[in-house]
């Protein structure tokens, strides 16, 4: 018998986990970016198709992880489709969590990773283009959060592996 207590996911999280929107690889993506760690299993790769006016025409994702991870990536793609890149840049992990009807605190990192992948994709898009004034030169707090999450996950995984081995 399992001693694990199921997490209190919202109906929206469960729906998007069972029926994710925009899941899959995009062959003709303008840009792609990944956030997460293969060590813990929570990873999101985001693909964006961006038009000449810098509007996100299409967004898809590949996810390796839990229900909250899949739902966060799915809702993010729904939110950013049809938006100018500048508007998409302003999306926060809290907005993603709120759109999902809330996430358990232990799963906030899933919305942080989704937004982190988005911000990395936008930075990648401007890598060989003129950086717009709205795009900060230095990483934002949310971008730094993703880096911290990834480092922490790697560290915890290494410690756990040493104890098991």
Image (cartoon, rainbow, N blue to C red):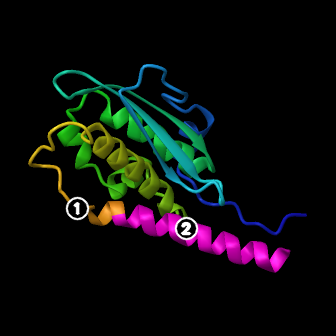
- Residue 163 covered by magenta stretch: yes
Marks 2 and 1 sit apart, C-alpha to C-alpha, by 28 Å
Quadrant in which residue 11 is drawn: top right
- Ranked by sequence position, the earlier of labels 2 and 1 is 2
Q: Is residue 4 left or right of residue 139?
A: right
Residue found at x 55% / y 28% = 24
Q: Which residue is mark 1?
A: 138
Say if residue 11 shows up in the picture. Answer: no
What are the residue bounds of the magenta stretch? 144-165
Q: Residues within 10 Å of mark 2 (few under 14, many from 20)?
A: few
* Residue 161: x %, y % from top left: 77, 72
Question: How many residues crowd mark 1 within 10 Å: few (<14), some (14–19), many (20+)?
Answer: few
Q: Position of residue 34 (x, y in %)?
A: 48, 46
Labels 2 & 1 near each other (Cβ < 8 A) = no
Q: Say left or right for 162 vs 116.
A: right
Taking the spot 20% from the left edge, 33% from the top edge, the residue there is: 84
The residue under the point 33% across, 36% down is 79
State whether residue 111 is above or below residue 27. Answer: below
Q: Is residue 52 visible?
A: yes
Judged from this view, the residue extending furthest toward the right is: 1
Residue 140 left/right relative to 101: left
Residue furthest toward the left?
133
The quarter in which the C terminus is drawn is: bottom right
Which SS class for mark 1? loop
The x, y position of residue 29, in whole percent, is 40, 25
What residue did someone put label 2 on? 106
Query: Would residue 37 be counted in the magenta stretch?
Result: no
């Amino acid at each position: 018998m399992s001693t694990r207590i199921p997490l209190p996911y919202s109906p929206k999280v469960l729906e998007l986990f069972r029926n994710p929107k925009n899941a899959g690889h995009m062959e003709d993506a303008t840009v792609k970016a990944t956030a997460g760690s293969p060590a813990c299993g929570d990873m999101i790769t985001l693909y964006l198709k961006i038009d000449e006016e810098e509007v996100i025409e299409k967004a898809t994702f590949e996810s390796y992880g839990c229900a909250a991870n899949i739902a966060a990536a799915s809702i993010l793609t729904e939110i950013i489709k049809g938006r100018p890149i500048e508007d998409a840049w302003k999306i926060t992990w809290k907005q993603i969590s709120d759109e999902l009807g809330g996430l358990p605190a232990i799963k906030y990192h899933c919305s942080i990773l989704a937004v982190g992948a988005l911000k990395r994709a936008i930075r990648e898009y401007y890598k060989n283009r003129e950086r717009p004034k709205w795009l900060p030169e230095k990483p934002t707090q949310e971008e730094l959060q993703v880096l911290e999450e990834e480092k922490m996950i790697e560290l915890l995984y290494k410690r756990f592996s040493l104890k098991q081995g």
